[in-house]
Image (cartoon, grey):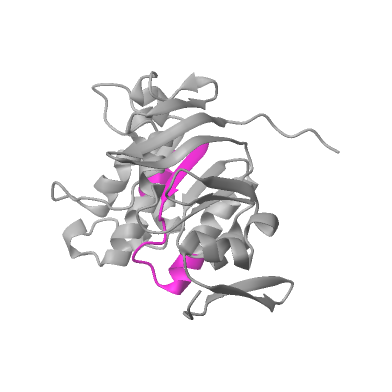
């Protein structure tokens, strides 16, 4: 058996709390190069807060998160951003700008202070826009974009950042089925090329298709992590989502269906 690569992202005894409630308790896992980890759980279970904490954008209530051995909460942000990109669940457009200008923000961790983006930065960004299928919109004002186009622009921005670790909070938000598949296919390829991908998703069927492992968050401190073939099973998902879910054989895998009947 070949040795497993060292974890790039190491999480140890991490607690995520809100007033009066523990969402995640003592979370510990490592994510290595080449891995795609899907995070699943009900609305309000702490997926977004956990992703922000993993990315160093929210203080841990206890425990630690290390990126290549460095504490993400004690390392200069620009240094972290050269290796780790965070895609938030929602993107706010604070100022009018073009698609290219917005996507170019992904290059800022690599641009020296008081310098402008180079021709190489623009070429990397244009490639990212092409990858998500909006390259021809580079000169469009972002206020003219649809919700799905705006989501793909946010994805292009993190691709332009060229990190080794992607933390993606519901990357398929606002996307139709075709673009959901295209988007997760992009990050599956990134993982296959050696990146580390951690993505929160709502659909267990997407998780079983694209991810290597799953992290389940139950919203009351409990969590579970393991290979998709072990973790994604009907009984466990029924408990996770508090609704009956059945597994149906499909090709060489299975699909999950919420039946809607009483527990």
Residue 193 placement (x, y as % from top left): 63, 45
On screen, 13 above or below 237?
A: above
Residue 135 placement (x, y as % from top left): 37, 59
Is the N terminus in the top left, top right, bottom left or bottom right quadrant? top right
Q: Is residue 126 visible?
A: no
Locate residue 74 relative to residue 212 in the image: left or right. left
Q: Residue at x 42, y 26 (%)?
A: 62
Q: Nearer the viewer, residue 212 or 23?
A: 23
Q: Residue furthest right?
A: 1
On screen, 34 above or below 214?
A: above
Q: Residue furthest front?
A: 263
Q: Residue at x 50, y 38 (%)?
A: 165
Q: Residue furthest left?
A: 95
Q: Is residue 26 visible?
A: yes
Numbered marks: total: 0
On screen, 175 above or below 100?
A: below
Q: Which residues are magenta?
A: 157-181
Locate residue 140 relative to residue 8 in the image: left or right. left
Residue 124 placement (x, y as % from top left): 42, 43
> Toward which corner of the image does residue 108 lie, by quadrant?
top left
> Toward which corner of the image does residue 195 lie, by quadrant?
top right
Q: Nearer the viewer, residue 105 or 52?
A: 52
Residue 177 colored in magenta in the image: yes
Q: Nearer the viewer, residue 236 or 78?
A: 236
On screen, 20 above or below 13?
A: below
Residue 208 colored in magenta in the image: no
Locate residue 75 relative to residue 243 in the image: left or right. left
């Amino acid at each position: 058996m070949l040795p497993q690569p060292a974890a790039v992202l190491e999480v140890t005894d991490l607690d995520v709390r809100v007033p009066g409630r523990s969402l995640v308790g003592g979370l510990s896992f490592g994510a290595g190069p080449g891995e795609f980890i899907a995070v699943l759980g009900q609305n309000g279970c702490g997926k977004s807060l956990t992703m922000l904490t993993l990315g160093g954008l929210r203080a841990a209530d206890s425990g630690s998160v290390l990126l290549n051995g460095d504490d993400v909460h004690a390392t200069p942000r620009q240094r972290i951003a050269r290796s780790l990109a965070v895609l938030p669940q929602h993107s706010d457009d604070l100022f009018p700008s073009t698609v290219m200008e917005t996507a170019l923000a992904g290059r800022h961790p690599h641009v020296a202070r008081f310098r402008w983006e180079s021709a190489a930065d623009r070429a990397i960004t244009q490639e990212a826009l092409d990858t998500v299928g909006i390259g021809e919109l580079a000169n469009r004002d972002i206020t003219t974009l649809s919700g799905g186009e705006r989501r793909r622009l946010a994805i292009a921005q993190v691709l332009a950042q060229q990190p080794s670790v992607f933390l993606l909070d519901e990357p398929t938000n606002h996307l139709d089925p075709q673009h959901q598949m295209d988007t997760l296919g992009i990050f599956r390829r990134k993982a296959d090329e050696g990146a580390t991908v951690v993505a929160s998703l709502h659909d267990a069927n997407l998780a079983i298709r694209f991810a290597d492992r799953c992290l389940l968050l139950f919203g009351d401190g409990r969590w579970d992590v393991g290979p998709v073939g072990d973790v994604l099973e009907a009984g466990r998902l029924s408990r996770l989502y508090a609704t009956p879910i059945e597994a149906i054989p499909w090709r060489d895998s299975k699909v999950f269906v919420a039946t809607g009947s009483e527990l």
